[in-house]
Image (tube, grey):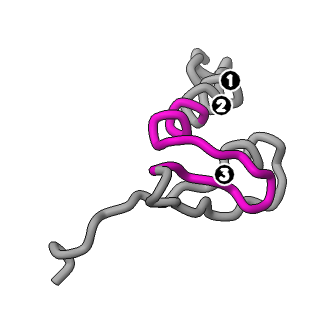
């Protein structure tokens, strides 16, 4: 049954997430093959959205790459 349906990954808007606005799920437009946010008008294909999240994650959580100073004690 579930094999018949086309799998579409659900994304939250990376632009709203970066600005810490109430995050909502992005809508998928099959005709243009892109995701768009109805709140902030961000639009992009799957690769662009995933890249935006990758850059955001690297910038926001860059301190997590280093061990905690108390871990050395």
Where in the figure is residue 19, as x and y percent of width and height? 83, 43
Query: Which structural element holds mark 1?
Result: helix
Query: Which structural element holds mark 2?
Result: helix
Q: Are marks 1 and 2 in contact (CB under 8 Å)?
A: yes
- Name the residue tied to disc 3: 13
In the picture, residue 27 is in which quadrant?
bottom right
Q: Are marks 3 and 2 in contact (CB under 8 Å)?
A: no
In the picture, residue 7 is in which quadrant?
bottom left
Where in the figure is residue 58, as x and y percent of width and height? 60, 24
The disc at residue 59 is: 1
Residue 33 to residue 44: above or below: below
Specify start and end residues of the magenta stretch as a single range. 33-52
- Name the residue tied to disc 2: 56
Instruction: Indicate the quadrant containing the N terminus: top left, top right, bottom left or bottom right.
Output: bottom left
Residue 41 counted in the magenta span? yes
Q: Is 36 in front, or is 49?
A: 36
Q: Is 32 in front, or is 17?
A: 32
Give the distance between the C-alpha atoms of the residues marked 1 and 3, in whole angstroms. 17 Å
The answer to whether residue 2 is left or right of residue 15 is left
């Amino acid at each position: 049954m579930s094999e018949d349906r086309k799998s579409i990954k659900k994304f939250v808007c990376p632009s709203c997430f970066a600005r810490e606005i109430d995050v909502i799920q992005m809508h998928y437009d099959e005709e243009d093959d892109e995701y768009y946010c109805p709140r902030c008008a961000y639009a992009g294909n799957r690769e662009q959205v995933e890249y935006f999240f990758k850059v955001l994650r690297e910038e926001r959580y860059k301190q997590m790459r280093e061990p905690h100073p108390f871990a050395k004690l």
